[in-house]
Amino acid sequence: MNILLTSHRFHPDIGGIETISDILAHHFTAAGHAVRLITKSCGDTITDQQFPFAVLRRPSALQLLASVRWADVVLQNNLEVRQLWPLLLCKRPLVIGLQTWIRTTSGERGSLQRLKRLALSSADQLIACSNAVRLDCSPRASVVGNPYKTSLFRNLQGVPRRSAIAFLGRLVSDKGADLLLQAFADLQPTDWRLSLIGDGPERAALERLCAKLGVSDSVDFRGALQGEALVQALNQHEIMVVPSRWREPFGVVALEGLACGCVVLASDGGGLPDAVGSAGLLFRRGEQADLQAQLGRLLSDSSLREQLRARATGHLRAFQQEVVCNRYLSILEQVSS
């Protein structure tokens, strides 16, 4: 097949959609399909030549139309209404991956969001990253959870796992790091440390909060880590907490923690329950008291941690790159046949 994959953002930008698009494009190419990826992200020719597929950045109208004519099927990794017009002139099967809510940041649906929901009717098939996104965007969508980088995130042998809790994410209020700091301070767990892995505009405020709570000596600000450095760090931690206030559409970060041997505690909003499954615990989103109670359970009960950790391998199978990408391919083949 000739697969045209649109990804509003892509390398060198970093984020969930960028990573998923990269995984899909590499897998489709390795499976023998021709892939052309269209993105609004800027890049450079030298870097793009290293990809095993064609990358077309900020295409003109004629380039976009030519790419649709070239394609046997079009896959939008998240809806892009402005990229749909060539399909009015050149009919091709269309699959749209739903990676987030079709709502404003305040959770409402304005005229643009209503237009986007109407545009979903033009797709031959919809793929939602979680049950929550399916229910919110379109009940006719198939649910295919997002993949994590299977070859990178893994349980390392010989790396000592410490009595430590990891937070991984941007240091912004929506991610809830302050809730975790408050719970950690109230529990005052002896010999346990907390690592905040990531960076962002709230770092200085979180450092001041640590001082106010009297936990500065027990909290490590590790900064942003990627690749093997991140994998090494996660393997050194016993627990990962994902305390998001925002309803995460999915939550690949939870998969990354599970794959590195962490026991995961996450908020129950959005798609995080899908990502965590039965291999972790959930707390009521935004409720610091419930976060504290569930974290206290994990800190005090090593047998519970081992029970949850033993479930991770089976849970992660459904989110391995090959499994997820093959499910996408099956849908693309079905609509293009």
Image: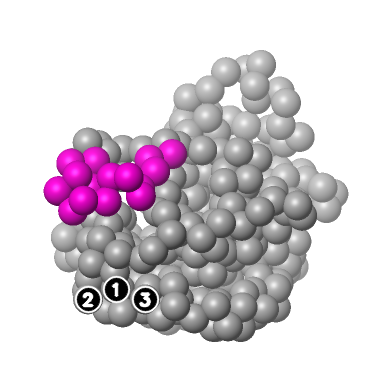
Residue bearing the label numbered 2: 289
Task: Residue 80 in the image: state x and y as whole percent.
Answer: 41, 50
Q: Is residue 102 left or right of residue 74?
A: left
**Residue 249 falls in image quadrant:** bottom left
Q: Is residue 109 visible?
A: no
Count the labels in the image: 3
Q: Residue at x 39, y 63 (%)?
A: 190
What colour scheme has been applied to the protein in the rendered image? Answer: one colour
256 or 147, which lies in front? 256
Residue bearing the label numbered 1: 292
Q: Amino acid at mark 2?
A: Ala
Q: Is residue 233 left or right of residue 212?
A: right
Q: Amino acid at mark 1?
A: Gln
**Which mark is nearer the camera, 3 or 2?**
3
Q: Residue at x 65, y 40 (%)?
A: 228
Helix, strand or loop status at disc 2? helix
Question: How busy is the neighbourhood of tag 3: few (under 14 within 10 Å), some, or many (20 plus)?
Answer: some
The dominant secondary structure in magenta is helix
Residues at marks 1 and 3 touching, judged by CB atoms closer than 8 Å: yes
Residue bearing the label numbered 3: 296
| Residue stretch in magenta | 206-222
Q: Is residue 60 left or right of residue 336?
A: left
Q: Residue at x 71, y 31 (%)?
A: 51
Q: Amino acid at mark 3?
A: Gly
